[in-house]
Image (cartoon, rainbow, N blue to C red):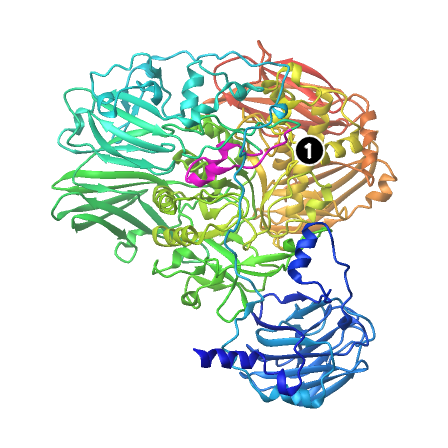
């Protein structure tokens, strides 16, 4: 041991002592560099003469030592740079920089380089080219390099020999040491890859003797610890805990509108009487009772007996949270209105609850195995049946399953009791107000993941008083034989590029609960395909795979594929799988599935340190145990961002990007294909069925703050997302993980980015029970993997989970799914960073978030009627705490200050509630359109996805959504809908050029560009025939708007016609070079609109066809239609408008449709606009 240490110390100190090598130097530095990775930078700081520990203390006390300029950076300084290097690969031609001082792209620099496989001096742009030594380098060996400056010239020594001399640059250089800096632009420049060892910089010029002395002793290069120039992803080292003490009472929200009185929902017979609905499995509906556990003195054994009286227990809403029950029963007011949430106590999250129901089993279950299943309980459950404890389970997303065969009575009722506990760390509420601000995002409840961590409070949801405790999903009873069919999985691969065939593989998990083997038939049926396989199942679990090699009928010809919205029909197929033994069905499962194959293009580090642009096809993996991508912390590497945001003032850490690495076993695999033609960046591209998908969508923080997630409640949101032409929803932090969510995403062609249950690294805490977390994750993957909508599994919101969870999730996805990409983080790793969340100037959205952007948001104001529905009249104006409580933030990430400044500049400060809403709709339409048009302007160069934060609000909110929680649709919805049309002409706000975005297969279009003054005069009218690229952007032309506008505001109308001259799309802008010129819109005369309405019935709903015509000489801007009940004036919701906030030139006509539920009230149409008088038109 002593000998090894002595050798190491001798190597590091070989320049000192008898060779008269000075001890004082920068270094030694030891660095390892990847060929396509980052370089490394170290500061050059002059010694202050103060002990560093003392200097640090003085800095903290506010006393700063005077900065001294490092003499080494001066033009005539004397210095010596010494190091060894080993190149990973030769440089046959071109130049790569090894190490040196200053900015390598500056006028003056001092770098050692390799040029055409020879050492060289690179002395900055002032010299134009490197000074090259006539000494070829040997490959695969260490070389010594020493550069000596005497103040007039630099002498370069290689392996102890003088090889070149060059005059020194006279200017000073930046005070930093650079190791393998990025080559910059211009010339044949490369990036060094390999190792640099024992780099030192001395403040004197070495003599030839000193140089020889340094070279004389070759170090042992295996001894130093090398710093990675391309760092690995770090683990979390710090976090915050949310609200840690009771809020200062002076900051609590206050309102003039008061608190509403609770109002109970009338009970129906179905609420009072238990019925098992459906057919095997049966759902236990109705008859549920609920009580707070502290009020119940009986035990679980007693409560679960038939003679137990529930007395004054509440009639429970199941599925539903305990708070939902209490609101339904009139104990507490609706927390969505005003400040009502303040009237609900926090103690609801600090106590357990009892649920109880009595039910009879169907006669068809006689003689069969019976399984009682809980589809979702938050947070922990203990279950008793007929006086016996069945067991318990924990986690909001773990199904609880119990064999109740021996306990169920077929002749009488059965009593079921469930004790439900809330998450053990509910935290403290932080109540938003103007004075308090939005507070922290989450807190200690994140420790309890998997749960609804957002319910502790976030900047888009208040503290939900019960933290969504309760039986929030169905409770079911299933009858089977000894063999039960488990969670099915369907894997589709498309072997031919023309998608004319689909190979279907069906995974059938089976569980034989008997003590001996059972022989029987597995039968799988979908469409006209029928497959039967005879198997003998040993006791326990078995997975049977049905493949095309054994069953040729599983090769489907001309398949009906599942496509994302905008790319085709999201076709679904019904699969029934059953196991039959002795002529009887033991068990069967039925699912809907989609035939589709998802693949992923992204840039990954290979084993040689090179970035490779590849397509990853997980479904082609023949051995699921073999990983394709290294998702570990060590496998995630930082590089200089290849696609920086083009915005000034960017923080240094945002100028870097992170990428995954390829596993060694994946290189050469059929699941990894090179992407030809390169790619301008490193970010992810999603492909479905071999087609790149221009991914546009939004985040759902939570579908509903109280998890009211029936199909009836959720379907309007999904239908509206489809109508908005978006194609992805992100299940943020897994808060929406339930069957109805995925089934509706399948139906409407909406891809799902699926998070698990941790949030922001370095800010939020991490789950304290990894085993529980992974157990819930395993069950979720098995439960939902058959849904074609899910395209990505993600470990954490904004960061990588702790290694035990991250690696556990990657392994679960690979072994249980192996058809999808797993990534640890929702941002940065082969993705853009999150944000911004405040309104930017509109042209900024064309410059930022280049690549795959998962979060980008702005305030989004509900409609006038939507605001009135949740803000009491006395609190509507001026902006009050009630606004702040509903997320109108005066500070923090979502501060509305830029929005209000933008409004004041463009249209003048709002004069009242209605004026504010009117101006806000103008801004939101324009801004949301710009967000998605800015994305399309650089489609595939390198933009591949843009998702707004958020599209869905968990409750009535004024921030970050594009539709109201009550299904109303404000202007941000229609700005998004307009920008995301599959065929769309748009104006690039950075240079006023016109582009055609075409996601269709059509090629021939005509694009008309008309520029009109505010008084209706046509200033320019152009028509262009376009042969458009498919699934991409085509330039159309560039009107000279600055000249046409002449300092004023003009209107721009873009129209697209197909090859048959049929209108396909239109787009309407108000434009001025100076934002303040938009105030001219305030002076527009009132326009006159005629309206005709007809109503018909179609497919179980009504449809209103509304024709509007501008009969005035004045353009009519932002014409808003609102479907109302003619008798009460209340909105009819949901309502599906083909478009809204329509702008019309003089004498222009438009026909719109509105679909709405059949039956009910007689409709009327409300009409208002930017320069329209508000009125209501009755339907004749």
Span colored in magenta = 436-459
Q: Residues within 10 Å of mark 1 (few under 14, many from 20)?
A: many
Where's residue 290, x and y in %? 34, 20
On the picture, is 1091 further left or further right than 286? right
Against 602, residue 999 (above or below) is above
- Front residue (pair 518, 1103): 518
Which image quarter: residue 1171?
A: top right
**Foreground: 753 or 1013?**
753
Relative to 270, is 600 above or below? below
Q: Is residue 764 left or right of residue 418?
A: right
Identity of the residue drawn at 71% across and 75% down: 111
What residue do we see at 40% from left, 23% from top?
322
Which is more toward the observer, 1173 or 876? 876
Write the residue at 60% across / 27% down.
248
Label 1: which residue?
896
The residue sitting at the right extreme is 1046
The reply to whether residue 571 is in sight is yes
Q: Main secondary structure of the magenta part?
A: loop
Question: Of all residues shown, which one is farthest toward the top?
Answer: 1127
Q: Is residue 445 magenta?
A: yes
Closest to the observer, 393 or 809:
393
């Amino acid at each position: 041991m002593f000998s090894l240490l002595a050798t190491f110390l001798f190597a590091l100190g070989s320049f000192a002592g008898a060779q008269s090598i000075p001890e004082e130097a920068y270094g030694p530095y030891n660095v390892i560099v990847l060929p396509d990775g980052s370089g490394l930078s170290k500061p050059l700081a002059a010694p202050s003469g103060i002990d560093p520990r003392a200097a640090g203390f003085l800095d903290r006390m506010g006393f700063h030592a005077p900065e001294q300029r490092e003499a080494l950076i001066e033009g005539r300084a004397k210095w010596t740079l010494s190091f060894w290097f080993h190149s990973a690969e030769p440089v046959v031609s071109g130049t790569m920089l090894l190490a040196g001082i200053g900015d390598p792209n500056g006028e003056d620099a001092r770098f050692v380089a390799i040029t055409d496989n020879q050492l060289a001096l690179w002395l900055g742009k002032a010299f134009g080219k490197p000074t090259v030594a006539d000494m070829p380098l040997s490959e695969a060996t260490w070389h010594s390099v020493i550069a000596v400056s005497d103040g007039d010239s630099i002498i370069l020594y290689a392996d102890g020999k003088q090889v070149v001399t060059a005059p020194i640059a006279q200017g000073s250089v930046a005070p930093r040491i650079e190791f393998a800096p990025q080559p910059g632009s211009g010339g044949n420049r490369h990036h060094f890859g390999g190792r640099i060892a024992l780099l030192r910089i001395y403040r004197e010029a070495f003599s030839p003797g000193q140089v020889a002395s340094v070279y004389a002793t070759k170090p042992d290069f295996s001894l130093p610890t090398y710093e990675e120039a391309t760092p690995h992803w770090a683990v979390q080292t710090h976090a915050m805990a949310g609200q840690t003490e009771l809020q200062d009472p002076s900051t609590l929200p206050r309102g003039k509108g008061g608190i509403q009185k609770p109002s109970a929902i009338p009970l129906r017979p179905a609420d009072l009487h238990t019925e098992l609905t459906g057919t095997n499995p049966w759902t236990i509906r109705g008859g549920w009772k609920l009580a707070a556990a502290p009020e119940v003195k009986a035990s679980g054994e007693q409560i679960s007996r038939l003679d137990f009286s529930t007395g004054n227990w509440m009639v429970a809403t199941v599925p539903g949270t305990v708070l939902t029950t209490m609101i339904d029963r009139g104990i507490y007011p609706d927390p969505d209105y005003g400040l009502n949430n303040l009237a609900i106590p926090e103690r609801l999250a600090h106590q357990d609850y009892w649920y109880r129901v009595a039910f009879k089993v169907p006669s068809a279950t006689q003689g069969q195995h019976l399984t009682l299943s809980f589809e979702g309980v938050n947070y922990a459950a203990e279950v008793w049946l007929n006086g016996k404890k069945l067991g318990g389970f924990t986690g909001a997303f773990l199904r609880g399953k119990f064999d109740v065969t021996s306990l169920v009575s077929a002749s009488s009722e059965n009593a079921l009791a469930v004790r439900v506990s809330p998450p053990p760390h509910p935290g403290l509420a932080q109540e938003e107000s103007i004075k308090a601000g939005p507070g922290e995002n989450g807190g200690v409840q994140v420790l309890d993941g998997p749960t609804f961590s957002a319910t502790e409070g976030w900047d888009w949801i208040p503290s939900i008083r019960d933290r969504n405790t309760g039986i929030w999903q169905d409770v079911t009873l299933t009858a089977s034989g000894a063999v039960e069919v488990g969670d099915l999985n369907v894997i589709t691969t498309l072997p031919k590029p023309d998608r004319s065939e689909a190979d279907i593989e069906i995974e059938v998990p089976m569980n034989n609960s008997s003590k001996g083997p059972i022989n029987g038939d597995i039968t799988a049926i979908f469409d006209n395909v029928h497959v039967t396989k005879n198997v003998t199942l040993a006791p326990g679990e078995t997975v049977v795979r049905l493949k095309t090699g054994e069953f040729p009928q599983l090769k489907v010809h001309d398949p009906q594929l599942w496509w994302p919205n905008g790319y085709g029909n999201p076709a679904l197929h019904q699969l029934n799988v059953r196991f039959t033994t002795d002529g009887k069905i033991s068990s069967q499962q039925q699912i809907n599935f989609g035939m589709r194959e998802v693949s992923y293009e992204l840039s990954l580090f290979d084993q040689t340190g090179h970035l490779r642009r590849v397509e990853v096809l997980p479904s082609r993996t023949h051995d699921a145990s073999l990983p394709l991508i290294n998702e570990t912390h060590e496998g995630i590497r930082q590089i200089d961002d290849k696609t920086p945001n083009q915005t000034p003032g960017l923080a240094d850490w945002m100028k870097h990007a992170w990428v995954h690495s390829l596993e060694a076993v994946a290189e050469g695999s059929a699941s990894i294909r090179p992407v030809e033609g390169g790619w301008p960046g490193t970010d992810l591209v999603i492909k479905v069925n071999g087609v790149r998908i221009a991914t546009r969508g939004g985040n759902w923080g939570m579908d509903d703050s109280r998890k009211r997630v029936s199909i009836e409640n959720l379907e309007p949101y999904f239908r509206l997302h489809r109508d908005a032409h978006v194609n992805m929803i992100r299940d943020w932090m897994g808060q929406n993980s339930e069957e109805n969510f995925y089934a509706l995403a399948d139906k409407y062609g909406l891809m799902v980015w699926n998070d698990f249950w941790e949030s922001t690294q370095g800010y939020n805490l991490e789950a304290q029970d990894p085993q529980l977390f992974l157990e819930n994750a395993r069950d979720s993957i098995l439960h939902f993997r058959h849904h074609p909508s899910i395209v990505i599994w993600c470990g954490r919101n904004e960061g990588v989970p702790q290694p035990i969870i991250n690696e556990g999730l990657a392994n679960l996805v690979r072994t249980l799914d192996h058809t999808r990409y797993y990534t640890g983080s929702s941002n940065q790793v082969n993705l853009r960073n999150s944000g911004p969340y405040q309104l930017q100037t509109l042209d900024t959205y064309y410059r930022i978030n280049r690549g795959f952007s998962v979060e980008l948001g702005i305030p989004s104001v509900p409609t006038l009627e939507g605001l009135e529905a949740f803000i009491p009249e006395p609190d509507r104006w001026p902006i009050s705490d009630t606004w702040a409580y509903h997320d109108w933030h005066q500070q923090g990430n979502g501060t509305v200050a830029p929005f209000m400044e933008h409004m004041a500049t463009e249209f003048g400060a709002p004069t009242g509630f209605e004026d504010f809403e009117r101006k806000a709709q103008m801004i939101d339409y324009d801004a949301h359109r710009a967000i998605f048009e800015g994305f399309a302007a650089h489609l595939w160069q390198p933009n591949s996805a843009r998702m707004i934060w958020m599209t869905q609000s968990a409750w009535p909110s004024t921030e970050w959504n594009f539709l109201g929680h009550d299904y109303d649709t404000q202007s941000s919805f229609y700005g998004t809908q307009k920008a995301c049309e599959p065929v769309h002409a748009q104006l690039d706000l950075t240079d006023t050029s016109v582009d055609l975005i075409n996601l269709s297969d059509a090629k021939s279009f005509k694009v008309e560009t008309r520029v009109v003054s505010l008084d209706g005069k046509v200033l320019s009218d152009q028509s262009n025939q376009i042969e458009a690229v498919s699934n991409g952007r085509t330039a159309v032309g560039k009107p000279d708007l600055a000249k046409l506008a002449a300092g004023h505001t003009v209107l721009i109308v873009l129209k697209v016609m197909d090859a048959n001259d049929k209108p396909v799309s239109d787009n309407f802008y108000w434009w001025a070079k100076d934002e303040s010129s938009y105030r001219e819109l305030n002076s527009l005369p009132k326009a006159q609109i005629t309206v005709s309405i007809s109503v018909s019935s179609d497919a179980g709903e009504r449809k209103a066809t509304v024709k509007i015509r501008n009969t005035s000489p004045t353009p009519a801007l932002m014409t808003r239609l609102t479907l109302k009940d003619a008798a009460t004036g209340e909105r009819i919701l949901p309502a599906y408008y083909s478009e809204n906030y329509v702008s019309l030139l003089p004498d222009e006509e438009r026909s719109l449709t509105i679909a709405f539920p059949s039956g009910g009230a007689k409709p009327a149409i409300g009409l208002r606009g930017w320069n329209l008088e508000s009125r209501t038109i009755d339907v004749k």
